[in-house]
């Protein structure tokens, strides 16, 4: 199936590790040049750049960014646009997963969760639309949300769940505003996935997590990235404002 992605340009947040890294690689395989954000050199962004350049033959460029900072989030889009030119695809993947019961969460922890998981996607969607509207082209946006947005958290992550629920509501509004301008914007809701963010919890009590998944296994980032790549392609050009369940049956929404 032809996805119509060859020659496109994309921005992926949190693209040096986990799901974000897999998005960068899958997009590169489809001929997409990618700019991606990373938080720290410890994430080894150079590895992603090397893999895409030498093994795939498509360039990817890392941009060190603290997405919890307003000006850095805005500058990220400007810098990617300056480097790549027209940005056709935005994937808001980066996020934090802080822990704390409602009775214990400090205001600064709540703020960091919202700044990274909700405000940064808003700022990047805003930038994406401003550039695209001015330049006269459309594009695709994909936000990564969670089943916790619907069911809440059972393990002390209420602020994470709230940030992801906010992303669903924001996306619906953004999609409505931009639909006639050629931009479609969707979410994928993930469940339990093998990433560094949750691996310690999985190792500590794997049965607790696996037993919550009707399909009986934890998904790999590569699987989610393959599905997500479809959603930012021309194959799904008529879908917008949707949140797609890719949780292995946890959500069934």
Image: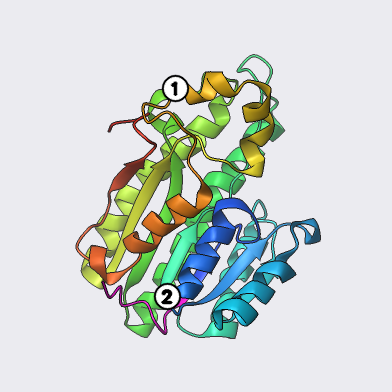
Position in image of residue 115 (x %, y %): 60, 46
Q: Nearer the viewer, residue 151 or 170?
A: 151
Quadrant housing residue 13: bottom right
Q: Which residues are magenta?
A: 1-9
Q: Is residue 6 magenta?
A: yes
151 vs 113: above or below: above
Dividing the picture into quadrants, the one containing residue 229 is bottom left
Left of 60 or right of it: where is 224? left
| Residue of label 2 | 30
**Separation (CA) of disc 2 from disc 1:** 34 Å
Q: Circle 2 sits in a helix, a strand or a loop, which is it?
A: loop
Please provide percent x and percent y for residue 228: 39, 57
Q: Residues within 10 Å of mark 2 (few under 14, many from 20)?
A: some
Q: Which of 134/157 is in front?
A: 157
Residue 25 belongs to the span the image colors magenta: no
The mark total stands at 2
* Point 44% across, 43% down: residue: 145
Q: Which residue is mark 1?
A: 212
Question: Which residue is more in the foreground, 214 or 166?
Answer: 214
| Main SS, magenta residues | loop
Say whether disc 2 or disc 1 marks the residue closer to the N-terminus: 2
| Element assignment for label 1 | loop
- Residue 149, compared with residue 145, is above or below; it is above
Q: Residue at x 58, y 73 (%)?
A: 35
Does residue 194 appear anywhere in the picture? yes
Circles 2 and 1 in contact, beta carbons < 8 Å: no
At 33% from the left and 54% from the top, the residue drawn is 186
In the image shown, does 162 or 32 lie closer to the viewer? 32
Q: Quadrant of the C terminus?
A: top left
Left or right, residue 19 beside residue 125: right
């Amino acid at each position: 199936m032809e996805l119509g992605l060859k020659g496109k340009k994309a921005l992926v947040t949190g693209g040096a590790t986990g799901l974000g890294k897999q998005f960068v690689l899958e997009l590169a395989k489809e001929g997409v040049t990618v700019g991606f954000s990373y938080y720290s050199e410890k994430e080894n962004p150079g590895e992603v750049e090397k893999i895409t350049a030498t093994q795939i033959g498509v360039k990817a460029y890392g941009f060190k960014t603290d997405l919890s900072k307003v000006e850095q989030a805005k500058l990220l889009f400007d810098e990617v646009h300056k480097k790549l030119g027209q940005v056709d695809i935005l994937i808001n993947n980066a996020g934090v997963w802080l822990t704390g019961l409602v009775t214990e969460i400090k205001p600064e922890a709540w703020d960091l969760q919202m700044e990274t998981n909700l405000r940064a996607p808003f700022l990047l969607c805003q930038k994406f639309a401003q550039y695209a509207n001015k330049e006269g082209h459309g594009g695709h946006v994909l936000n990564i949300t969670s089943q916790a947005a619907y069911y809440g958290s059972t393990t002390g992550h209420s602020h994470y769940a709230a940030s992801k629920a906010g992303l669903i509501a924001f996306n619906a509004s953004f999609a409505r505003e931009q639909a006639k301008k050629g931009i479609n914007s969707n979410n994928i809701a993930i469940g339990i996935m093998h990433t560094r963010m949750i691996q310690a919890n999985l190792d500590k009590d794997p049965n607790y997590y696996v037993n919550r998944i009707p399909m009986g296994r934890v998904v790999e980032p590569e699987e989610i990235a393959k599905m997500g790549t479809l959603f930012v392609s021309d194959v799904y050009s008529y879908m917008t404002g949707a949140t797609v369940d890719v949780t292995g049956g946890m959500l069934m929404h």
